[in-house]
Image: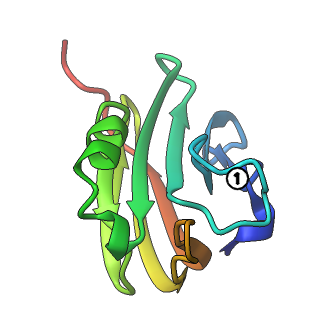
Amino acid sequence: MFTAEDGASGSAFAIEGPTGEFLGECGVASTDLLAADPALPAPALDVWLFDKHGLQTVNAFVIPPGLAQDAELKRRLARRGQVHAAQAGLRFNLESQRLRLDACLDRVEVAAPSPGGQGGIRRAELQFEVRDRPPRDG
């Protein structure tokens, strides 16, 4: 579960193979677009997958539905990964050279924008399932 209090640190999980070897990490945190006050709701969540094979990180950003209309925000985030509007039941995946992360957003609590401020994601429950995948050719 992610809460606004998790802020940029978020949550990270080690990914290990069947014999305990380290394969990578995955996690969720607020994006670096977060306002100076880490207690404020996250303007977007950064779901990430790091694969030690090839030293690759892939990202997906989950943004509040109200910000999904912000073309500039979506453009900035899309340069770094997938962009999805937050809604309960949202499913997406991230793939790296050797790993696949299937994510499901079970619940999401969005804060309404305050006058002169922006709304954001106050709380989110995500499920991650990570599996090894065959190496890509090339």
Number of marks present in the image shown:
1
For image coordinates 74% across by 57% down, the residue present is 7
Q: Is residue 15 left or right of residue 93?
A: right
Specify the color scheme.
Answer: rainbow
In the rendered image of this protein, does residue 2 appear above or below residue 34?
Answer: below
Residue 29, horizontal then vertical, whole percent: 64, 53
| Residue 23 in sight here | yes
Q: Residue beneath label 1, please?
A: 13
Quadrant of the rendered image containing residue 117: bottom right
Asked whether 128 or 37 is in front, the reply is: 37
For image coordinates 31% across by 53% down, the residue present is 83
Quadrant in the picture for the N terminus: bottom right
Q: Secondary structure at mark 1?
A: strand
Q: Residue furthest top?
A: 138
Asked whether 84 or 126 is in front, the reply is: 84
Residue 55, horizontal then vertical, whole percent: 53, 18
Q: Residue furthest front?
A: 116
Q: Amino acid at mark 1?
A: Phe
Residue 41, horizontal then vertical, whole percent: 64, 69
Quadrant of the rendered image containing residue 59: top left
| Residue 101 in sight here | no
> Within 10 angstroms of label 1, few (less than 14), some, or many (20 or more) residues?
few
Residue 112, horizontal then vertical, whole percent: 52, 83
In the rendered image of this protein, does residue 131 appear above or below residue 62?
Answer: above
For image coordinates 52% across by 76% down, the residue present is 113
In the rendered image of this protein, does residue 103 appear above or below residue 75?
Answer: below
Asked whether 30 or 118 is in front, the reply is: 118
Quadrant in the picture for the C terminus: top left
Q: Is residue 109 left or right of residue 89?
A: right
